Image: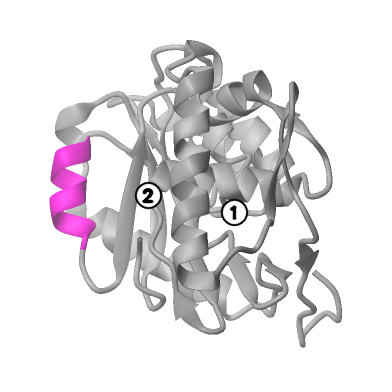
């Protein structure tokens, strides 16, 4: 989990070397970096989470990077830095027209991408906007910074547990079957099984109960799947609604 004063960065790239270098350089008091390796994995993750900024390598192993960029911008208002291939400076106008906030080419300086990200985030944070926070009694789920609290106390979850919780909250009062959960969390690669979903739900319930007592927010619908009961979006002082 990131600290509340950090900005979350989603790095989308199949390039493990680039990912390692950026993670080493960017993981500090200012940034907390997460990585996805494919377009499908990225789009699935973004169904339950909104990072502060995305660094998108436009060449992906499965989906067309330009289509992924378009789908992200249609889904949410999040700043994106597109990383293009060496020699493809001519694609800068295409990236900006598609909604990217910046465009740079490989190879790039880690310091350069850090400074670009900071400039974009300073511009973003100067805009008044609501937080993605859902409330169920004294339980608060902040979908933007991976934070879950009960009466102001942090509850530590794994990334998968948080993604499952976030997805259930976003579909509050709807019953999701295990197959839907698997596809939303792991995508079409189906890295999960119905048993693994049950195990994650069991662990999630145990952690919530440890901090909250026996609150049945995550309900089992026998023979179908799971649902989250009674999650309401908090009001925001800048807009009145979320």
- Pointer 1: what residue? 78
- Pointer 2: what residue? 158
Tell me the crowding category of disc 2: few under 14, some 14 to 19, or many 20 or more residues within 10 angstroms, Cα based: few
> In the rendering, at what x and y percent does residue 111 appear?
19, 59
The structure residue drawn at horizontal position 64% and vertical position 18%, both measured from the top left corner, is: 179
Chief secondary structure of the magenta span?
helix
- Residue 126 is covered by the magenta coloring: no
**CB atoms of marks 1 and 2 within 8 Å:** no
> In the rendering, at what x and y percent does residue 3 appear?
35, 72
Q: Which residues are magenta?
A: 19-27
Q: In this view of the protein, can residue 91 be seen by the observer? A: no
- Label 1 to label 2, Cα distance in Å? 23 Å
Ranked by sequence position, the earlier of labels 1 and 2 is 1
Check residue 207 in the rendering and tell me which mark sits there, or answer none: none
In the image, 118: left or right of 168? left
Q: Is residue 140 above or below residue 228?
A: below
> In the rendering, at what x and y percent does residue 9 appear?
39, 54
Front-lying residue, 14 or 225 = 225
Looking at the image, the residue that sits furthest to the bottom is 237
Q: In terms of secondary structure, where does tag 1 sit? A: loop
Front-lying residue, 35 or 140 = 140
- Residue 26 is covered by the magenta coloring: yes
């Amino acid at each position: 989990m990131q600290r509340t004063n950090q900005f979350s960065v989603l790095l989308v790239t199949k390039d493990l070397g680039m990912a390692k270098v950026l993670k080493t350089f960017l993981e500090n008091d200012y940034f907390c970096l997460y990585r996805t390796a494919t377009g499908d994995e990225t789009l699935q993750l973004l169904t339950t989470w909104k990072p502060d900024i995305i660094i998108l390598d436009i060449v992906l192993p499965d989906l067309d990077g330009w289509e992924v960029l378009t789908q992200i911008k249609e889904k949410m208002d999040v700043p994106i830095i597109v990383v293009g291939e060496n020699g493809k400076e001519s694609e800068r106008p295409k990236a900006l027209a598609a909604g990217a906030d910046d465009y740079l080419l490989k190879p790039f300086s880690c310091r350069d991408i850090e400074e670009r990200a900071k400039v974009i985030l300073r511009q973003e944070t100067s805009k008044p906007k609501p937080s993605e926070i859902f409330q169920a009694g004294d339980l608060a789920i902040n979908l933007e910074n991976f934070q879950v609290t009960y009466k102001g106390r942090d509850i530590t979850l794994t990334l998968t547990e948080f993604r499952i919780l976030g997805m259930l909250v976003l579909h509050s009062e709807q019953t999701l079957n295990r197959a839907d959960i698997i596809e939303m969390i792991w995508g079409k690669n189906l890295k999960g099984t119905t048993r693994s979903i049950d195990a994650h739900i069991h662990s999630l319930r145990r952690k919530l109960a440890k901090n909250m007592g026996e609150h049945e927010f995550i309900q089992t619908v026998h023979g179908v799947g799971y649902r989250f009961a009674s999650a309401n979006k908090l009001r925001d002082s800048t807009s009145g609604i979320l």
